[in-house]
Every structure is written in structure tokens, then in C-alpha cells.
Image (cartoon, rainbow, N blue to C red):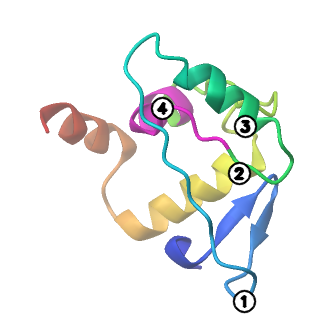
């Protein structure tokens, strides 16, 4: 399964023959309201909010922080699918090695 051709929407993987992925990137500095906007948009059933994606490996996969769906990230169908896709694309790089590399870049 190619992750760049498919995306999970609130628990189910979207097939590549469905409508194209629409992506909105919201960037903000501290205390700008971007987290509040992320939370509000993420409550819509057709929107998947990903929060601070740069912290995904440490917060989601290592520390098992809660997803906005209410489940720990290691139990959330969306983040489980993202993790599986990440592992299949990165081969032998472990999450801990990725975090070390990420901290150096």
C-alpha cells in the first residue's frame, strides 16, 4: 500500500480511485491560535487533523499520546495506518534512529 496514494479518513483508508486528497497546511507561531483552529477543524468527520506532525514519532509512536479521536495513538486506526505505511517505506530505520536523526537536522 503506497501511503502517498492513499489516506485514511477517520478510520477507513481512502482508495486512490476516490476523489483526490485535499490538504490544508496551517502554520503558526506560539500562541497564534493555530492549535485551536486545528482542534475545531479536526472535529469535522471528514477532516483528519494531525497536530504537530514533527512530533509524531516521539509523541505518537513512542509516548503513545492521545489522538483527538480519544484513543491512544497506538490504538487509533488512522495513526496505526500511518505507522504501518511509515515502517514499510523506511525499511530498517527504527523510530528511535529516526528521532535521533530528526533532532540533528
Q: Please provide the residue range marked out in magenta.
A: 49-60
Residue holding disc 4: 52
First reached walking from the N terminus: tag 2 or tag 1 = 1
Residue holding disc 3: 41
Residue at the extreme right: 45
Please give the label number shown on residue 17. 1
Q: Residue at x 81, y 35 (%)?
A: 43
Q: CA distance from mark 2 to mark 3?
A: 16 Å
Nearer to the camera, 15 or 73 = 15
Please give the label number shown on residue 54. none
First reached walking from the N terminus: tag 1 or tag 4 = 1
Q: Nearer the viewer, mark 2 or mark 4?
A: 4
Q: Tags 3 and 1 in contact by the CB under 8 Å rule?
A: no
First reached walking from the N terminus: tag 2 or tag 3 = 3
- Per the image, label 3 sits on a secondary structure element best described as helix
Residue holding disc 2: 78
First reached walking from the N terminus: tag 2 or tag 4 = 4
Classed neighbour count for the residue bearing mark 3: other residues with Cα under 10 Å, few (<14), some (14–19), many (≥20):
some
Residue at the extreme top: 31
Q: Nearer the viewer, mark 4 or mark 3?
A: 3
Q: Position of residue 39 (x, y in %)?
A: 70, 27
Q: Nearer the viewer, mark 2 or mark 1?
A: 1
Amino acid at each position: 500500500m503506497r501511503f502517498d496514494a492513499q489516506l485514511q479518513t477517520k478510520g477507513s483508508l481512502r482508495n486512490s480511485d476516490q476523489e483526490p486528497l485535499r490538504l490544508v497546511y496551517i502554520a503558526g507561531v506560539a500562541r497564534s491560535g493555530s492549535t485551536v483552529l486545528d482542534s475545531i477543524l479536526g472535529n469535522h468527520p471528514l477532516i483528519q487533523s494531525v497536530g504537530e506532525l514533527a512530533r509524531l514519532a516521539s509523541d505518537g509512536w513512542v509516548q503513545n499520546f492521545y489522538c483527538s479521536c480519544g484513543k491512544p495513538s497506538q490504538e487509533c486506526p488512522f495513526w496505526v495506518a500511518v505507522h504501518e505505511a511509515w515502517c514499510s517505506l523506511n525499511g530498517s530505520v527504527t523510530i528511535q534512529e529516526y528521532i535521533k536523526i530528526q533532532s540533528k537536522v
